[in-house]
Each structure stands twice: as structure tokens, then as C-alpha cells.
Amino acid sequence: MTTARSLARLLPCLLALSVGAASAAPAAAPRLWKATRTAPEHGTTVLYVLAATSVGLPVEFDGYYTRAVLPALRASSTLSVEGVGDGDEAPPDFDANPGCDLRQLDEAGIARLNDVRQRILTLTLQADMARRDALDVKALAKAPDPDTQARSWARLIEMSDEFTLLQFARDQAAALAVGRKTEGTGAEAPRGNVAAALIHARPDVAVHDIDDRTGMMRAYCASGPRRTLLLQDVVDNAAEPAARAIPRLTHDFDALLRNRAPAAGGPFARLAPLDAGLVCARNRGWVRRMNALADGGTHFYVVPVRNLFAARHDAADCDGLLADLEQAGYTVAPMK
């Protein structure tokens, strides 16, 4: 009886403590913004801007994804993401042949490029093995033998220019991630790029490239003498175990959503020297295309989280995409 009375007296205190702890926990940062602009002849044009990572963190598919992201997608007539390849031609004042100049790389950049070629070959052979493991007996019998395929991959990688190598490495990393997911790597494994999930969720939506036809190449080539850091980042992320990578990437993703600096030494911080191209140059291209929209429709964009806010340091000096949209006359607000 005494114990029961003591518990009865303690229960309100415990409840108060639990409520206080819950209220002290920081609210999840929004990652979807709604930008609206009204023109008398066309009505109100709506742009949804979703911040995302390239790997598809588990947090990107949480309750906010169901509550805010998917309804916004359902209301949209177009979906713009990276890498579709159907972008418009570059405007006349842009370089029509924006290839990368190897002479712009510093000594460390050249050494990094040579090292990354070998690492991409290793990554490709691992991805090829994962693809073979997924084949049935008949399909496997028709596939090239591993040695022949390996020599073919090696020639392709050796002959590829920087930007082609970057795209190829991303494809191999994605294939390897799918293979690991099929094998089962636990609940905290990446689920794949959120853009791909959105395309799957709305197979009827018109999908476009967020860049013009050579926009990503221009951005990469404009990223300065250390641009091969991006190539290194792709293979580093592919090689790192998910159990170690996911918590750190999730922490940095949340920091960037709150316009805070990511952890020093992490993937996001390591790529800061490339912000002049990957953030400033790309944002200018995106805003130019977004600013041309005045159709009274609703459009959905998936952008790298690093492009949301300003990049101001020794290597770059520009506003983020959200501020650029406000300067273009859009009213921008986060979705709760």
C-alpha cells in the first residue's frame, strides 16, 4: 500500500519530466520549401524545392516525407531532378563546349585523378559482381566472362574524361548500393536516392533534368583546381560501411538544413572548396530557368541540400537557392 501511494505521488512528477524532455528536443528541420509568385496574366506559379542527399538517408523517408513531400509531389505537374539528361540547350552566352581543362588542376588534383581511376575500377568490379549475383542461371550463362568484362571496364575507365568518369562512378556506386540492399544490410541502410523514389511514386509525372544539357559539366569544370575531390568523394562514400556513414551523414544533413556548418572533415565539409562551381554556378543556372516559369502551374524540384543557403568562404561567395528565388520575386516559406 505504501509503495502504491508513493508511486501515485511520483507519477505526476515523472510525467512532467517526460513532457519537459520532449519539449526540449529540437524539432525536425524542414527540408521542403514552397515558392510562389503571381503574374496577372498567368496566375500563381508554385515551385516546391526539396533538399536531398545523393545516397537517400533513412531520415529522408520519415513521417515528413509522407506528410509533406508526397502531397506536394501529387499536386505538381512536373518533377525536376539531377541526371535525367533531357535539359534544354545552354543559353547563347554560355560556353557551348564546356569541357574540363586538365591544366587547371593542381599537382594534388592530378595525383588524385590518377588514384581515383584505379579505385573506380575496383568499385566497378564490385558492382559488376553484385549485378552477376542478381542474374538467374540463363542470364549468367550469356554474360561476358569476368576477365573479359574486367579488361573492358579498365579500358573504358582509362579513356574517359573527368566528367564522364564522375557520371560512371556514380552509376557504379548506385549499382553496388542496390546489391548491398538486396543482400540485406539492416534497417539503417540507405534506401536509394529520394529522387528515384519520387519518380516511382508518381510514374505519370513529367520528369525533367534540373540542369540544362551541359549545366552539370560546366559546374564541375568551374569548381577549381581541386575539383577531383568530387570524384574521390564518390568512391569514398561507396567504400564506407553504412553503419558508420549514415549517422554522420544524417547529422551533417540536419546541420545544413538549419543553415549550420557540417562537421569538419566530413563529406560535406570536404567538398566546400568546390562551392564556386557546384553551388554558385549551378544555382545561377537553376534560378535562370525557374525565373522563366510563369505558367500558373506547380513544379517540384529535388536539389542537393548544400545548395539551399549561402556559400561564403575563401573559395566561393554567393547566396543560396532560397535567397536567389526571393530576389527573383518569389515568396519562399518552409513546409511544416
Image (tube, grey):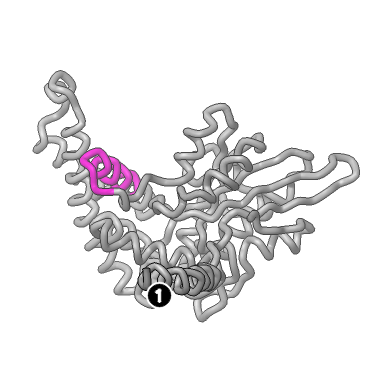
**Which residue, given by chain and number where applicable, does mark 1 sit on?**
263
Provide residue 109's location: percent of width, then percent of height.
Answer: 32, 69
Taking the image as shown, residue 111 lies to the left or right of residue 217, namely: left
- Say which residue appears at 46% left-offset and 46% top-offset: 194
Provide residue 159's location: percent of width, then percent of height.
Answer: 27, 48
Report the quarter where the N terminus lies.
bottom left
Taking the image as shown, residue 333 lies to the left or right of residue 193, namely: right
- Asked whether the viewer can see residue 172, the reply is yes
Q: Looking at the rendering, which quadrant does residue 248 occupy? A: bottom left
- Say which residue appears at 27% left-offset and 63% top-offset: 244
Q: Write down the region rendered in magenta.
A: 170-186
> Circle 1: is it few (<14), some (14-19), or many (20+) Cα within 10 Å?
some
SS of the residue at dot 1? loop
Amino acid at dot 1 = Ala
- Relative to residue 133, is residue 111 depicted above or below? below
Report the quarter where the C terminus lies.
bottom right
Q: Looking at the rendering, which quadrant does residue 322 occupy? A: bottom right
